[in-house]
Amino acid sequence: MRVLVTGGAGYIGSHTVLSLLEKGHVPVVVDNLSNSSVESLNRVTEITGKPIEFHNIDLCDEEAFPSFMREQTFDAILHFAGFKAVGESVANPLKYYKNNIGSTLSLLKAIDATTSTNPPKVIFSSSATVYGSSTELPLTESSKTGEGITNPYGFTKFVCERILADTAEANSAFQAIALRYFNPIGAHESGRIGENPSGIPNNLAPYITQVASGKLSELSVFGDDYDTADGTGVRDYIHVMDVAEGHVAALSLTESGFHAINLGTGKGTSVIELIKAFEKVVGAPVPFSVSPRRPGDIAACYADTSLAKQLLGWSSTRYISEACADAWRWQSQNPKGY
Ligand code: NAD
Ligand code: UFG
């Protein structure tokens, strides 16, 4: 398939471009490099031996993006482009509503999603954040969404899902799939591509690797008084290559309409357990101290993965230990990122 990959130079996008190439698809990347470097794609070419068509375009650019789309045809679109920093979205909500919702609207307009008789399918990067304060565990796709979302970033995912669902309702020829990622971590096993956060990481796994490498001095564990086995927060950490392969599997789903599908492992891991898993691969302790809970965090979140298995024939295949080893290889071989 000829596949448009928006945000394809970013963390999850670049790993997915690699998976697409491995399976013989033809990815075309559009990215404005606002949170990435084209070096990620150079390295995917180095790994696969295959060139990648890249266009530096902002999806919200009302001239350049529609004009690019008029010249192209795609069988499917993987829509990763968007901003993702939860804290920044609280401080600057309009930036997030504008870019995340604006880019999705711009994409749907460019493919005439409501009226076309043969629009390309759209596979959207959603997040477990849409489940908000749902406490049902594991989280299934029919668990309540929207209630208790604590930040604008999370709302943009909820709203974009709704936009896609409404569009699929209006046009039976349009298929949209929202893949609700749990917590993607790790890197490609080559150590050549990986997560490249700008500044101090917000997320646990890149923070741990930067402490382990000596770049940061100590990890703060946000709360050890949750109602979990060891008191620290529990999440469903999934290897980024499993997430990438989930997208390739979703390309084969033929049933029309809107589908929301969890991409997780189904297994919860606590902050302390993740620290221990990293210490094993690093071969040294990761210094940490306990600090107060981070506002907006929930105690535990992990996926029911049966729908992905049923609809996509996909389930995660990699262990947490592999994700930690791969993240560490990337961090230690690329201490300054790209
Ligand atoms: P990332 O920041 O590495 O990748 C996003 C890419 O989109 C970047 O390369 C950025 O330059 C590009 N981009 C942003 N706005 C754009 C625009 N208007 N036009 C063109 N390009 C634009 O983030 P990621 O971790 O790879 O996440 C990819 C997607 O998955 C995002 O939508 C994110 O919200 C979602 N997601 C990520 C996680 C996670 O933990 N990483 C979890 C759930 C969902
Ligand atoms: N944590 C720490 N110390 C840190 C960072 C995180 O103890 O320095 C803890 C958090 O309190 C939480 C766990 O580690 O218990 C995971 O936190 P992350 O920030 O890595 O991930 P979140 O689950 O908070 O958020 C992630 C993505 C969001 C997405 C959400 C739901 O960052 O984009 O998963 O899918 F919305």
Image (spheres, helix red, strand yellow):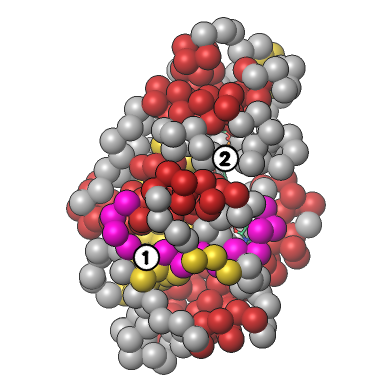
Residue flagged by tag 1: what amino acid is it? Val
- Which residue matches tag 2? 195
Horizontal side of 196 relative to 307 (left or right) equals right
Give the residue at x 63% y 67%.
Answer: 56
Q: Secondary structure at mark 1?
A: strand
Task: Answer with the quarter of the image where residue 23 lies.
Answer: bottom left
Q: Ligand 2 lies in which image quarter?
A: top right
Q: Residue furthest right?
A: 91
Q: Name the amino acid type tagged 2.
A: Glu
Q: Which secondary structure, mark 2?
A: loop
Q: Which residue is denoted by mark 1 in the rendering?
A: 26
205, above or below 263, in the image: above
Q: Pick whichever, 103 or 57, lies toward us.
A: 57
- Quadrant of the rendering where the C terminus is positioned: top right
| Circle 1 crowding by C-alpha within 10 Å: few under 14, some 14–19, many from 20 | many
**Residue sitting at 65 percent across and 25 percent down?**
210
Find residue 214 and report its horizontal and vertical position in percent. Answer: 70, 17
Q: Quadrant of the N terminus?
A: bottom left
Q: Are marks 2 and 1 in contact (CB under 8 Å)?
A: no
- Residue 242: percent from the left, percent from the top? 36, 42
Disc 1, ligand 1: is the CB inside 8 Å? no
Residue 330, compared with residue 308, is above or below; it is: above
For residue 204, side relative to residue 304 (left or right): right
Q: Callout 2 environment at 10 Å: few (<14), some (14 to 19), or many (20+)?
A: many
- Is residue 116 inside the magenta stretch? no
CA gap, disc 2 to disc 1?
23 Å
Tell me: residue 200, above or below residue 118.
above
What is the magenta range? Answer: 22-35
Q: In the figure, 4 relative to 120: above or below?
A: above
